[in-house]
Image (cartoon, rainbow, N blue to C red):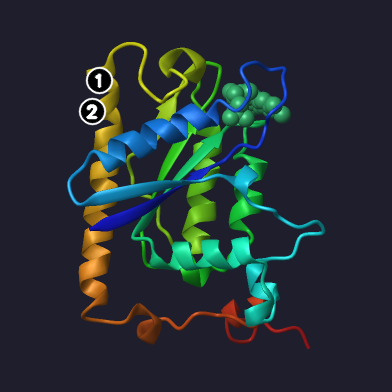
Amino acid sequence: MAHYLIFLGSTRTTTPPSPARLGERVAKACERLLSSLPHTTAEIIDPLALSLQAPFKPHFAYAQADAPDDLAELADKIAAADGYVMVSPEYNHSMSPALSHLLNHFGASLFAFKPSAIVTYSMGQWGGVRAAVAMRAFLSELGCLPVSAMIHIPRAQEALNLDGHFGQEQERWESYFGRTFGQLMWWAEAASNYKSQIDPTKVSPAFKTAPSQRNAPGSESS
Ligand SMILES: Cc1cc2nc3c(=O)[nH]c(=O)nc-3n(C[C@H](O)[C@H](O)[C@H](O)COP(=O)(O)O)c2cc1C
């Protein structure tokens, strides 16, 4: 059985623009379609259900036993999941700040060596493609490499009902989602199988103390 986390990249409960939090129906569609596949379970991670602290303090900045319960629980879920679906609206031609803020709470080692799928949407005609391009770099840095097929939903308010079902052309939409989810599942299964032969942290140990651990030799300032 493979388990996927679907990160819902919106906390926008106010209008305009209306409707608010269009991302809920996109995440529901992903959950419905992934869960309908054999040996697959999926769960939506909703940033509104978490009490993210201000000022920003990521999970890895707490002493191990001191992290708030909801952050600690989500860290465990991220570590245990087989792959991720990242659902983002496009805000100012960029990925959702709610999604990047949520993901920034967790170290890359929790996501690494597992695949992700990029799902973007908008109320307009472009479906969030400009946000999606930048998400590739972000997710690669987390180590959950995005699969090549992406899902973009233009006019998501018309394409999807509140419960995550498609208003029209259901078969075409499901086949469009299915291509990306097929790639996600293939890579997730491959990574999981290979992990049982070779522990990835042995060939590439996690950097956990400082960003400078990534530096090339000779690049340290004197
Ligand atoms: C601050 C802000 C910036 C936006 N920028 C874009 C944009 O660059 N491109 C676009 O297609 N839609 C843009 N939109 C429209 C969003 O795609 C639309 O409001 C969508 O419903 C947002 O997702 P959400 O309702 O889940 O938060 C923007 C909306 C907001 C609130």
User: Could you tell me which secondary element the residue under label 1 belongs to?
Assistant: helix
* Residue at left offset 38%, top offset 61%: 81
Q: Position of residue 71 (x, y in %)?
A: 61, 63
User: Split into 4 quadrants, where in the image is the N terminus?
Assistant: bottom left
Q: CA distance from mark 2 to mark 1?
A: 5 Å
Reply above or below: 105 against 29. Answer: below
| Camera sees residue 34 | yes
User: Could you tell me which secondary element the residue under label 2 belongs to?
Assistant: helix
Q: Position of residue 150 (x, y in %)?
A: 37, 37
| Camera sees residue 150 | no
Q: Residue furthest left?
A: 38
Crowd rating for badge 2 (residues with CA inside 10 Å; few <14, some 14–19, many 20+): few
Reply above or below: 51 against 96. Answer: below
Relative to residue 220, is residue 22 drawn left or right? left
Give amino acid for label 2.
Answer: Ser
Relative to the observer, which residue lies in front, 207 or 213? 207
* Residue at left offset 29%, top offset 35%: 33
Reply above or below: 83 against 112. Answer: above
Cβ(mark 1) to ligand 1 < 8 Å? no
Q: Position of residue 163 (x, y in %)?
A: 42, 24
Residue hosting label 1: 172
Task: Answer with the quarter of the image where residue 151 lies.
Answer: top left
Relative to residue 87, is residue 83 drawn left or right? left
Cβ(mark 2) to ligand 1 < 8 Å? no
Q: Report the disc number at residue 175.
A: 2
Badge 2 vs badge 1, beta-carbon distance below 8 Å: yes
Give amino acid for label 1.
Answer: Arg
User: How many numbered circles are shown?
Assistant: 2
